[in-house]
Image (cartoon, rainbow, N blue to C red):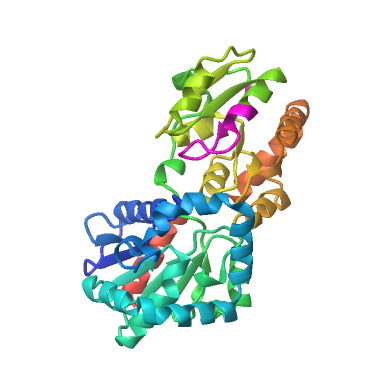
């Protein structure tokens, strides 16, 4: 444990536009508590909800519906992913949001600012500059590869990125390379620390020891074709066991629980012990969210990706495939074929396991915690 000379107050800027920004903040805070227990204070501010004018303050509740408009979302992402265009957008927005940014700055004095959201950086840094405030500003990028230009602003003191690809994106937007550090994506510590073996975890969970275990997830809301994929896996009569996590989708959970299965099947709702599930499984079938991918890599779990959000998650798919840690299977038939291939050729699956282990960054959250504290010490 490192002892600090002062107890800094840390401001986290996030918004609940998707689950990744909050969970990233919480993972960093957890790591700070583990590395510097009792030596700092913090607050989390949802800037869209609390410090944005209408209709921007509705960004959180409307995000799920907007992100499901896949083509429009992708076009909006690609069209705006340009430094010159973003400068114009922010210049147009500034008269409308500046008083809110000044209020946010005034009401939350701190020793270091940590942003885990792309859309707050340029507006808040402008307000900070106008007020001649030299408080260190750290951006923690929570997109793996397809990093929107809004993430990057040279006025930040430190920009932490999860991959070398993200670092190159930042450099292409004229970010000073000295401000960039490749550390990884912050995930909860329980994904990185486990004393139990795969066999012990399976015994605890009641899963078979002699089967390849397929873990099928769709996020906290149980979105995507979980039900249909489950049925097709069952119809294929694969020599495997199936674990389905339906999240908060109670209707789907009940439907699957009442289904007559031809293979060993285990149905769960929302679970808090996902780290154990990942370590006990052999294959993950999932959407291409950056957090889930990072967690799976730490668990040395090869991935079959079946869905990505256009624009912001396309790079995640390329990253997993190019690095040999998984397969892209956008159609249900592709998922079944990929599973059959890995079951018939276990050496290929084990190579993907090895590649996942190589890509994993289990200490990212703690390394980020130290990087933040280093900014206070400057």
Percent across and percent down for residue 166 are 59, 65
Which residue occupies 38% across, 74% down? 137
Residue 248 in the image: above or below residue 8: above
Residue 244 in the image: above or below residue 14: above
The quadrant holding residue 303 is top right
Residue 227 within the magenta-colored segment of the rendering: yes
Percent across and percent down for residue 117 are 44, 63
Q: Would residue 139 be found to the left or right of residue 218 on screen?
A: left
Which residue occupies 57% across, 46% down? 293
Q: Which residues are magenta?
A: 212-229
Residue 197 within the magenta-colored segment of the rendering: no
Residue 307 in sight in this render: yes
Which residue occupies 25% across, 68% down? 8
Residue 344 in the image: above or below residue 183: above
Q: Would residue 63 be found to the left or right of residue 149 on screen?
A: left
Residue 311 in sight in this render: no
Percent across and percent down for residue 44 are 30, 59
Percent across and percent down for residue 138 are 41, 70
In this orientation, which residue lies closer to the viewer: 90 or 143? 90
Which residue occupies 65% across, 41% down? 306
The quadrant holding residue 242 is top right
């Amino acid at each position: 444990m490192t002892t600090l000379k002062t107890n800094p107050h840390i401001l986290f800027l996030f918004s609940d536009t998707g689950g990744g920004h909050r969970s990233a903040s919480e993972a960093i805070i957890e790591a700070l508590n583990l590395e510097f227990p009792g030596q700092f204070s913090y607050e989390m501010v949802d800037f869209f909800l609390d410090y944005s004018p209408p209709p921007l303050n509705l960004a959180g509740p409307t995000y799920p519906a907007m992100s499901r408009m896949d083509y429009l979302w992708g076009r909006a992402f690609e069209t705006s992913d340009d430094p010159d265009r973003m400068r114009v957008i922010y210049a147009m927005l500034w008269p409308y949001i500046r008083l809110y940014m000044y209020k946010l700055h005034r009401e939350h004095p701190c020793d270091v600012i940590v942003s885990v959201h792309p859309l707050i950086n340029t507006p808040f840094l402008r307000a900070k500059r106008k007020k001649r405030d030299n408080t260190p500003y750290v951006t923690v990028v929570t997109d793996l590869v397809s990093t929107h230009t809004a993430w990057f602003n040279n006025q930040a003191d430190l920009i932490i990125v999860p991959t070398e690809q993200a670092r190159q994106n930042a450099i292409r937007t004229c970010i000073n390379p000295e401000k960039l550090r490749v550390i990884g994506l912050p995930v909860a510590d329980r994904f990185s620390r486990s004393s139990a073996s795969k066999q012990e975890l399976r015994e605890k969970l009641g899963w078979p020891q002699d089967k390849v275990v397929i873990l099928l997830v769709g996020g906290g809301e149980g979105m995507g074709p979980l039900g249909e994929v489950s049925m097709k896996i069952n119809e294929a009569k694969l020599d495997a066991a199936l674990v389905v996590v339906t999240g908060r989708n109670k209707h789907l959970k009940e439907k699957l629980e009442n289904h007559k299965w031809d293979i060993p099947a285990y149905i769960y709702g929302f679970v808090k012990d996902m780290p154990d599930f990942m370590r006990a499984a052999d294959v993950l079938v999932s959407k291409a969210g950056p957090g889930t991918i990072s967690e799976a890599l730490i668990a040395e779990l090869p991935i079959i990706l079946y869905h990505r959000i256009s624009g912001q998650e396309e790079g995640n798919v390329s990253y997993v495939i190019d690095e040999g840690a998984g397969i892209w299977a956008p159609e249900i038939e592709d998922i079944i074929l990929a599973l059959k291939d890995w079951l018939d050729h276990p050496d290929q699956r084990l190579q993907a396991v090895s590649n996942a282990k190589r890509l994993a960054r289990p200490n990212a959250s703690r390394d980020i915690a130290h990087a933040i504290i280093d900014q206070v010490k400057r």
